[in-house]
Amino acid sequence: MEWTGVRYADKPTVEVHTWIAAPPTGVWKLVSDIQLMPSLSSELQSVEWLDGRSGPAPGARFIGRSKHAALGEWATTSHIVEYEPPRVLAWAVEDPQHPSAVWRFTLEPQDGGTLLREWMQMGPARSGLSFAIDRMPEKEQKIVFVRMREFEAGMAATLEAIKKLAENPRTPDEASR
């Protein structure tokens, strides 16, 4: 990621992608398993579906608990805002109409496998990062840039882990995808 000088109010975005030698339906099973994500992330610690749900659907909600050395621990409620199996899964953090972040996975068939993209947008609503910016407004652009680089690295690691799971199934059930 190159320096952009964006501010939080600019709603900065980052996207990473990878090609996976597995069909979209198999990759979708991994991507749509939100409870798998903490095992693939150094920041996301746990996920819990709300309202009796056990998986994604339009309007479904889940609590995500996260931990970061500089930001501490926190929990957020996310809302599924796009759900088109096996193509798109997206959620808005906190208020779906005015989120503190939006995250999206997109899958498309490509060359006998799947092109998997993970995208995120910071803001427009305030988030935990807003408190750091409030304390050091003169460093806002650097704070945003550093956090976006962290997101980019974490997303790349998540996609690599999904790729490994999809291409190297460990159980007969995973192999049948």
Image: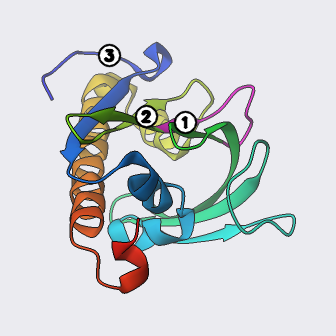
Depth check, front residue: 154 or 148: 154
The answer to whether the residue labelled 1 contacts the one labelled 3, judged by CB atoms less than 8 Å apart, is: no
Q: Which residue is painted at 44% across and 62% down in the image?
A: 30
Depth check, front residue: 18 or 15: 18
Three-letter amino acid code at the position of disc 1: Ala
| Position of residue 47 measured from the top left corner of the image (x, y, whole percent) | 59, 69
In the current view of this chain or complex, which residue is farthest to the bottom? 171
Q: Which mark is residue 101?
A: 1
The residue that label 2 is drawn on is 120
Q: Which residue is painted at 73% across and 49% down in the image?
A: 57
Q: Residue 149 carries which label?
A: none
Gap between marks 2 and 1, in whole Å?
A: 7 Å
Gap between marks 3 and 2, in whole Å?
A: 15 Å
Q: Can residue 8 be seen in this view?
A: yes
Q: Describe the element under mark 3 as helix, strand or loop.
A: loop
Q: In which quarter of the image is residue 7?
A: top left
Going by the image, does 43 lie left or right of 51?
Answer: left
Of tags 3 and 2, which is closer to the observer? 2
Of tags 1 and 3, which is closer to the observer? 1
Please report the bounds of the magenta region as a residue range: 93-104
Q: Is residue 95 magenta?
A: yes
The answer to whether the residue labelled 2 contacts the one labelled 1, judged by CB atoms less than 8 Å apart, is: yes
The residue that label 3 is drawn on is 6
Tell me which numbered mark, 2 or 1, is placed earlier along the sequence. Answer: 1
Going by the image, does 132 lie left or right of 152?
Answer: right
Q: Mark 3: give few (<14), some (14-19) or many (20+) Cα within 10 Å.
A: some
Q: In this view, does 36 lie above or below 17?
A: below
Depth check, front residue: 151 or 164: 164
Tell me which numbered mark, 3 or 2, is placed earlier along the sequence. Answer: 3
Gap between marks 1 and 3, in whole Å?
A: 16 Å
